[in-house]
Amino acid sequence: MSYKTQLKSTINARRAVLEEAKSAVGRRRKQLVDENHKEIETLENTLINIESILGSIISLCNEKSAQLREDF
């Protein structure tokens, strides 16, 4: 095998490795984006639940305040 042929073969092999690495990075990036979206959705749902609980607490406090005003 001539030097030129060996060089072309080496270059092609390195290109194939580089393409596979790029593909692996793309897959990992997509996986991380999907995981982040799931985490964001979970956090949004948690915030909605917290808002609901706080709303209930405020309503209870307002009711208790009204009762106390009536009592005094």
Image: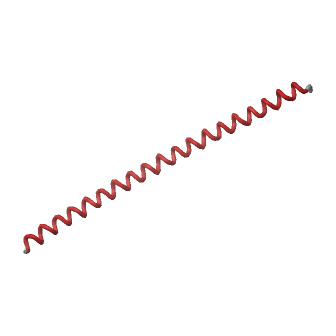
Q: Is residue 55 above or below residue 9?
A: below
Quarter of the image that includes the N terminus:
top right
Residue 45: x %, y % from top left: 38, 52
Is 41 positioned to the left or the right of 28 in the image? left
Is 16 positioned to the left or the right of 2 in the image? left
Q: Colour scheme used in the picture?
A: secondary structure
Residue at 29% x, 57% y is 52
Residue at 51% x, 44% y is 34
Residue 41: x %, y % from top left: 42, 49
Q: Is residue 8 above or below residue 64?
A: above
Residue 48: x %, y % from top left: 33, 53
Total residue callouts: 0
Quarter of the image that includes the C terminus:
bottom left
Residue at 83% x, 29% y is 9
Is 14 positioned to the left or the right of 36 in the image? right
Q: Residue furthest bottom?
A: 72
Q: Is residue 12 above or below residue 41?
A: above
Tell which of 28 and 4 is nearer to you: 4
